[in-house]
């Protein structure tokens, strides 16, 4: 196995856990999927739509997100937003992320 393949696979593993936190960080206000993909991408977090939509549905099923349909535009859009529970979960995950990155920084220095 080539070094590049190994790094690509390990990078994908690292990214998987961060996508949930990235998504939750942006959904304090209603946003539809394609807009969310663009917002994340603009901030350096690339998420494919085929990864995002199943994640949004799973988080909605868990009660972390809620959705509403907006049909006033030419194309109906489903908007997602964090629930109260989702906001609490986001804050806990954020704290955990900050602690983890601080500890990893200590390990790597």
Image: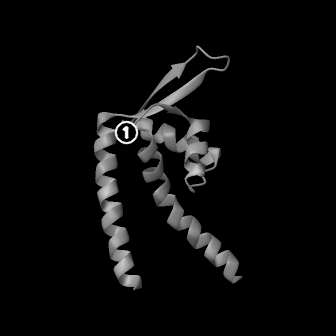
Q: Position of residue 109 (x, y in %)?
A: 39, 86
Q: Position of residue 42 (x, y in %)?
A: 59, 50
**Residue at left offset 47%, top offset 46%:** 23
Instruction: Answer left or right for 87 relative to 5.
Output: left
Residue with the mark numbered 1: 64
Q: Is residue 45 above or below residue 100?
A: above
Classify 10 Å Cα crowding around label 1: few (below 14), some (14-19), many (20 and above).
Answer: many
Q: Position of residue 33 (x, y in %)?
A: 57, 36
**Residue at left offset 37%, top offset 39%:** 64
| Total numbered labels | 1
Q: Quadrant of residue 38?
A: top right
Q: In terms of depth relative to the viewer, which is nearer, 44 or 13?
A: 44
Q: Is residue 29 above or below residue 101?
A: above
Q: Position of residue 91 (x, y in %)?
A: 30, 49
**Residue at left offset 28%, top offset 44%:** 88
Farthest residue in the front direction?
Answer: 42
| Colour mode of the rendering | one colour
Farthest residue in the top direction?
Answer: 72
**Residue at left offset 43%, top offset 35%:** 60
Farthest residue in the right direction?
Answer: 2
Instruction: Name the quarter where the N terminus is drawn.
Output: bottom right
């Amino acid at each position: 196995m080539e070094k590049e393949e190994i790094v690509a696979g390990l990078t994908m593993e690292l990214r998987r856990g961060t996508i949930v936190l990235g998504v939750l960080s942006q959904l304090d206000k209603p946003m539809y999927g394609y807009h969310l993909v663009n917002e994340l991408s603009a901030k350096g977090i690339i998420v494919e739509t085929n990864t995002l939509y199943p994640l949004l549905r799973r988080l909605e099923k868990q009660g972390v997100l809620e959705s509403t349909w907006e049909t006033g535009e030419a194309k109906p859009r489903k908007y997602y937003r964090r629930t109260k529970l989702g906001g609490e979960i986001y804050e806990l995950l954020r704290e955990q992320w900050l602690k983890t990155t601080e500890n990893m920084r200590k390990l790597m220095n």
